[in-house]
Image: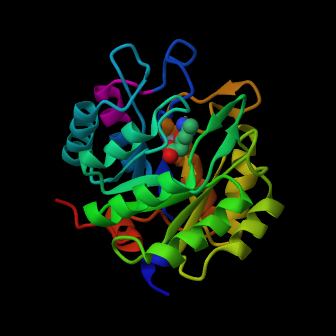
Amino acid sequence: MSVAREALLITVAPTGAETTKADCPQLPTTLAELVATAQECEAAGAAMVHVHIRDDDHRPSLDPQRLADTVSALHEGTGLVVQLSTGGSVHDPLDARLKVLDAAPDSCSLTMGTTNFGDDVFSNPWPFICDLYQLSQEREVVPEFELFDLGHVAALSRLIKTYGLPYGGKVHVDFVMGVPGGMPGTADALVAGVAALPRETTSWGATGIGRTTLPVGLAALSKGGHLRVGMEDVLTLSRGVPVESNAQLVERAVAMGAMAQRRPMTPSEARELLGCRPAA
Ligand code: KMH
Ligand code: ZN
């Protein structure tokens, strides 16, 4: 087993599209806040950043210039693998979500099916998935397959069978669990999901939303998986105790990994694991 597989990939998802700045002033929504957060999280042990951007009013945005500037600023200010969200917010149109790849990130999220998302619907029709996947292959962007439900695992097998392997030749998956409308954030659901992964899968991680963050994180570690943490996914450390910074969540993930005798992976090891282009 290579060093990179034994080490723990920690991805930080610092912002998301669902929480408002008014509700959570410590949420990084400006470019300066995002870069500072990313630097703190890299120092704490993160190797990849999953990015949603906001506009001047702190609302979710997919503005192409802002996305390109964000990728540049994160590459200049950190060594992290930069993953742009193509999920955006539930209100973003599909064509704007495809254009995210124009910003030339190292990686992009790619959700493998439509899911109920609280009171909303997170729309990912099959033709959109196929278009986004083929575009990622053409642009040499490594997709991270986001699986919100067990049906998404089967859809991933279908996608690979139809269009072949991603750019870079690796298949990295992230189970996003505990979304109201998706699979529950339980060890049982994770075990079922991992058992169903296509044989082409080379690595996987998991994140549990809200109060499922700890059960999912611990179950992922016990199954040999990687972790995503961040204020996109959870805003409390424990009941009634707010998260003060994304770095706090990364530090907790590092401590959990240490219990499992997994050291944090470096960004260059993460590039190798995921099959990303070398850092510029
Ligand atoms: N904000 C959610 C609707 C992704 O980044 O690709 C979708 C999401 C997944 O966060
Ligand atoms: Zn996201």
Q: Main secondary structure of the magenta part?
A: helix
In the visual, does 231 lie left or right of 51? right
11 or 189, which is in the foreground? 189
Quarter where residue 217 is shown = bottom right
- Of all residues shown, which one is farthest toward the front? 127
The x and y percentages for residue 75 are 23, 48
Q: Quadrant of the C terminus?
A: bottom left
At x 41%, y 55%, the residue is 132
246 or 17, which is in the foreground? 17
At x 72%, y 32%, the residue is 118
| Region of the chain picked out in magenta, as a range | 28-37
The x and y percentages for residue 221 are 66, 65
The x and y percentages for residue 15 are 47, 33
The x and y percentages for residue 203 are 53, 72
At x 50%, y 55%, the residue is 127
The reply to whether residue 206 is in sight is yes
